[in-house]
Amino acid sequence: MIDHTLLAPEASDQDVEALCREAVELGVCAACVSAARVPAAARALDGSSVRLAAVVGFPSGAHLAAVKADEAARALADGADELDMVIDLAYAAVGDWAMVGEEIASVRAAAPAPVVLKVIIESAVLSEDQIDAACLAAVQAGADFVKTSTGFHPAGGASEAAVARMAAAVGSAGLGVKASGGIRTAAQALAMIDAGATRLGMSKTAQILEELRADR
């Protein structure tokens, strides 16, 4: 269920390669890195079962839809299997959900199935009604997951309440929910799963898994 994550802007190819080696050792689902670091991650993960996720329009989401689509296509060409795209929060703020849907659809067109597309809605910024609307836009545009947060917004990261609301909004459509942003302990990770998360984005993966082993 874990996307082992390194998205620090200063992370080098060598840092990402180390993350990927750890991802293989830990047996996680995916390693999640910045688009520019995808080639290094692909080399490091070659021959393993760990998937490679790249972020798109990260972290602000304030990118033209065409730019996000191009970034997605380039990441796939470089070896990514999954994409985590950030919606344009300005459209969300004014309730222009048609535009949110259009930009998700543009990335989906550049990255058709079986590429896994996760849509980051920055749930801590949105009201409950806006969370519902953002989730609906992701469903209608053909996404595979909705994701809480980038982990970089000052409003905060994942919350149990947001995960539960997102799970309720997309569950009947068969989409997954990725909780990401501020998950630093085993208790927090388990709480997100209990709330409905089907994937977890974390940088403290090794520590959290060690906590879980110790609690057995």
Image (cartoon, grey):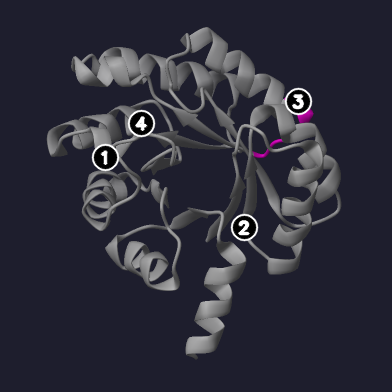
Quarter-wise, where is residue 133 in the image?
A: top left
Residues at discs 3 and 4 in contact (Cβ within 8 Å): no
Residue under numbered circle 4: 138
SS state under label 1: helix
Disc 3 to disc 4, C-alpha distance:
24 Å
| 135 relative to 51 in the view: left or right | left
Quarter-wise, where is residue 39 in the image?
A: top right
Disc 1 to disc 4, C-alpha distance:
17 Å
Residues at discs 3 and 1 in contact (Cβ within 8 Å): no
Which tag, 3 or 1, sits closer to the chain's start? 3
Residue under numbered circle 2: 29
Disc 2 to disc 1, C-alpha distance:
25 Å
Tell me, for residue 124, which label it has, or none: 1
Which tag, 2 or 4, sits closer to the chain's start? 2
Disc 2 to disc 4, C-alpha distance:
22 Å
Residue under numbered circle 3: 77
Q: Residue at x 47, y 56 (%)?
A: 200
- Give x and y (percent) for residue 13: 79, 37
Which tag, 3 or 2, sits closer to the chain's start? 2
Residue numbers of the magenta segment: 77-81
Of circles 3 and 1, the one toward us is 1
Q: Residue at x 59, y 19 (%)?
A: 110
- Assess disc 1: are there few (<14), some (14-19) or many (≥20) residues with their C-alpha within 10 Å of its C-alpha: some
- Assess disc 4: are there few (<14), some (14-19) or many (≥20) residues with their C-alpha within 10 Å of its C-alpha: many
Q: Residue at x 51, y 22 (%)?
A: 57
Residue 32 can be seen in this image: yes
